[in-house]
Image (cartoon, helix red, strand yellow):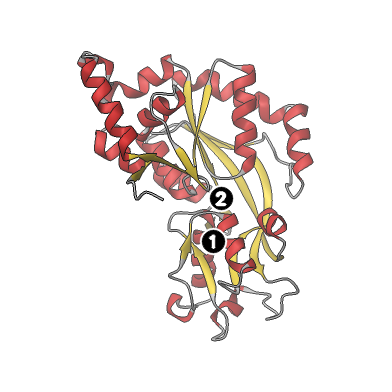
């Protein structure tokens, strides 16, 4: 196997000095080839060099490469939107949007906090959140109100789902609570900073007065629910934090500890009026709700409801 260099989308955007949305658009158009490692898209260095050389040989005018200031306007004209988050429900939402509108959906698999910051920076259009606030016991709104200060936005419920602990089949270590994580014979696998699961864990540790230093494996991270569940399944760790569906997919046990509200956030701008209307209609449609219901493990009792809206 050759040792060719490859880049993440983040690295490509930094090398070309454009936003990640520009890179996603070029990928969507087939101008930049990528391959996947799990859920992460990567690009061969040779393919990136070839793209740069082709642009030079074509002698494209400077206006052909959008400046950061004009980028979001051009994306609206080409009807491309970026949906950020990791749950499979977002893939279904993206397909439904494409079926009933001129929008083409691109996917970013960032965690909740990073997604919200991307929305603030104008790098995505729809973000999904599941961030627990230990002081209020509430999901998402405390973070949204702090980070989107000065913006108008709407928060819509997508689904609710169980969050808790992944444990080995039969739960041989009898792990049943957050406080069990500090036991010296238990090793955990963590999620990356900025993910909803990481925020949930950190808030629960704070509430229960547990130091991160008391948790063996706290510094070992994976970037999605399936990777954490697989680490437990293969014996790499005894426990991890995540959602119920991933546990069932890899065949391990799950200890439910909280029901989390999984919401969508969109900025309320004149350009987004049509998109907000379309998303509302899809979430309330029987077709969308039937497809989500077929997946199992999701609570749709609030799906489509407006959780919060600025005016």
- Residue to which mark 2 is pinned: 130
Relative to 196, does residue 267 appear above or below in the rendering? above
Lateral position of residue 49 relative to residue 252, left or right: left
Front-most of residues 297 and 247: 247
Q: Outermost residue toward the bottom?
A: 184
The image shows a total of numbered marks equal to 2
Q: Quadrant of residue 92?
A: top right
Verify CB contact (< 8 Å) between mark 2 and mark 1.
yes
Q: Which residue is drawn at 27% across and 16% down?
A: 64
The 10 Å Cα crowd at callout 2, few under 14, some 14 to 19, many 20 or more, is many
Q: Give x and y (percent) for residue 186.
A: 57, 80
Front-most of residues 99 and 9: 9
Relative to 221, does residue 280 appear above or below in the rendering? above
Q: Inspect this view and state whether residue 149 appears.
A: no
Q: Give x and y (percent) for residue 120.
A: 38, 38
Q: Give x and y (percent) for residue 155.
A: 55, 37
Relative to 196, does residue 167 appear above or below in the rendering? below
Relative to 41, does residue 217 appear above or below in the rendering? below
Q: Which residue is drawn at 60% across and 74% down?
A: 238
Front-most of residues 31 and 66: 31
Lateral position of residue 189 relative to residue 71, left or right: right
Q: Give x and y (percent) for residue 232.
A: 61, 68
- Residue to which mark 1 is pinned: 200
Mark 1 residue element: helix
Q: In which quarter of the image is residue 156?
A: top right
């Amino acid at each position: 196997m050759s040792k060719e260099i490859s880049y993440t989308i983040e690295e490509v955007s930094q090398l070309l000095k454009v936003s990640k949305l520009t890179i996603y658009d070029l990928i969507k158009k087939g101008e930049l080839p990528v391959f996947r490692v799990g859920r992460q898209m990567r690009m061969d260095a040779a393919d990136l060099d070839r793209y740069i050389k082709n642009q030079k040989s074509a002698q494209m005018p400077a206006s052909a490469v959008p400046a950061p200031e004009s980028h979001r306007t051009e994306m609206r004209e080409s009807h491309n939107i970026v949906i950020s988050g990791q749950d499979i429900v977002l893939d279904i939402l993206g397909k439904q949007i494409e079926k009933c509108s001129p929008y083409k959906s691109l996917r970013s698999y960032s965690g909740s906090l990073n997604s919200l910051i991307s929305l603030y920076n104008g790098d995505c259009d729809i973000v999904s959140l599941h961030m627990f606030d230990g002081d209020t016991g509430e999901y998402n709104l405390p973070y949204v109100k702090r980070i989107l200060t000065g913006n108008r936005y709407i928060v819509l419920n997508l689904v609710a789902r169980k969050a808790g602990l992944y444990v080995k089949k039969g739960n041989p270590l009898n792990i049943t609570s957050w406080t069990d994580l500090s036991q010296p014979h238990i090793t955990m696998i963590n999620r990356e900073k900025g993910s909803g699961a990481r925020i949930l864990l950190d808030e629960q540790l704070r509430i229960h007065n547990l130091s991160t230093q008391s948790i063996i494996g706290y510094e070992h991270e994976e970037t999605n629910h399936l990777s954490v569940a697989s680490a437990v399944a293969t014996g790499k760790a005894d426990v991890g934090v995540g959602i119920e569906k991933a546990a069932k997919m890899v065949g391990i046990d799950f200890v439910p500890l909280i029901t989390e509200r999984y919401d969508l956030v969109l900025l309320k701008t004149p350009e987004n009026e049509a998109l907000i209307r379309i998303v509302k209609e899809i979430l309330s449609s029987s077709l969308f709700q039937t497809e989500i219901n077929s997946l199992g493990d999701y609570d749709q009792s609030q799906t489509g409801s407006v959780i919060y809206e600025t005016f």
